[in-house]
Image: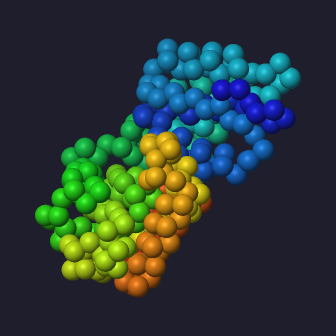
Amino acid sequence: MSALPGRPQRTVFFVSDGTGITAETFGHSLLAQFEGVEFQQVRMPFIDTLEKASEVIQRINRVVEPGGARPIVFSTLVNAEINAAVRCSKGLFLDMIQTFVEPLEKELGVRSTHSIGKAHNIADSKQYNSRIEAINFALSHDDGQLHRGLEKAHVILVGVSRSGKTPTSLYLAMQYGVKAANYPLVPEDFERGRLPSVLPGYRAKLFGLSISPERLAEVRNERRPGSRYASLENCRYEVNEAELLMRKEGIHWLSSTAKSIEEIATTILQEIKLETRGF
């Protein structure tokens, strides 16, 4: 990926003897604070031998810029020998294990297990199984396709088509084990001035998503270009009517236009007073 004109570019490596998800997630949070830089990101998971570590070092060293700009290396390498080897690369080495685990060991008075992949070794756990169950629930209750079992839902998202209900439902399921159903609000609902008939019985579980008409038109045109469904006029009508209906029904809602999935999900968890189930 080439840098945008006038913007510096740096290569970032996420190195781990596990999946690399932890290093990447934490690294993204830090890099997001630096808007003036274009980052080319490389995940290098399962670096669990010195031979693999040697390949990582060579790859990191190859991208050192002629002007001296170093690549940035986020590491969650648990094995001390492998960690020490990669630390000798020419990159800026940010060691998450040493930075956080060692102070915690001193504070808690307990040695950590230093087990590879510990954060994701949950295949037999209750939490893992609850997330799988929640994902299946979200898929089967997507877009109002199944009414049966709604009493098991932790939250039911409502809003116009393409306002972000499906990705939010799946994110809540995958990250927190939250069973989220979602229902579209359509012109027939606006003409009646009422929610879909199956929903009033679950009013306490409802949460609404809206979106700016301009953004909605962009999203819909990617799917059905030039259609009335995607026209700005129709999008304005649907968004306005959906927001009026949600206000009338006393449904808490937010606009997804300028919010990330993470922000939307966190707001929903707070509003519905759900306990997170991520661990």
Tell me where residue 70 appears, x and y as whole percent.
75, 28
Q: Quadrant of residue 121?
A: top left
Please say if 113 is above or below 88.
below
Lateral position of residue 66 relative to residue 169, left or right:
right
Please say if 275 is above or below 90.
below
Specify whether residue 20 is in view: yes
Lateral position of residue 266 relative to residue 34, left or right:
left
Tell me where residue 74 appears, x and y as whole percent.
60, 37
Q: Which residue shows up at 59% across the image and 24% down it?
A: 85
Q: Residue furthest left?
A: 148
Quadrant into which the N terminus falls: top right
Q: Which residue shows up at 64% across the image and 39% down it?
A: 94
Please say if 235 is above or below 128.
below
Lateral position of residue 236 relative to residue 183, left or right:
right
Q: Which residue shows up at 75% across the image and 40% down it?
A: 37
Tell me where residue 254 appears, x and y as whole percent.
50, 71
Lateral position of residue 91 relative to residue 267, left or right:
right
Count of all numbered marks drawn on residues in the image:
0
Tell which of 66 and 215 is nearer to you.
Answer: 215
Tell which of 238 and 67 is nearer to you.
Answer: 238
Q: Which residue shows up at 49% across the image and 67% down it?
A: 237
Tell me where residue 60 appears, x and y as whole percent.
65, 22
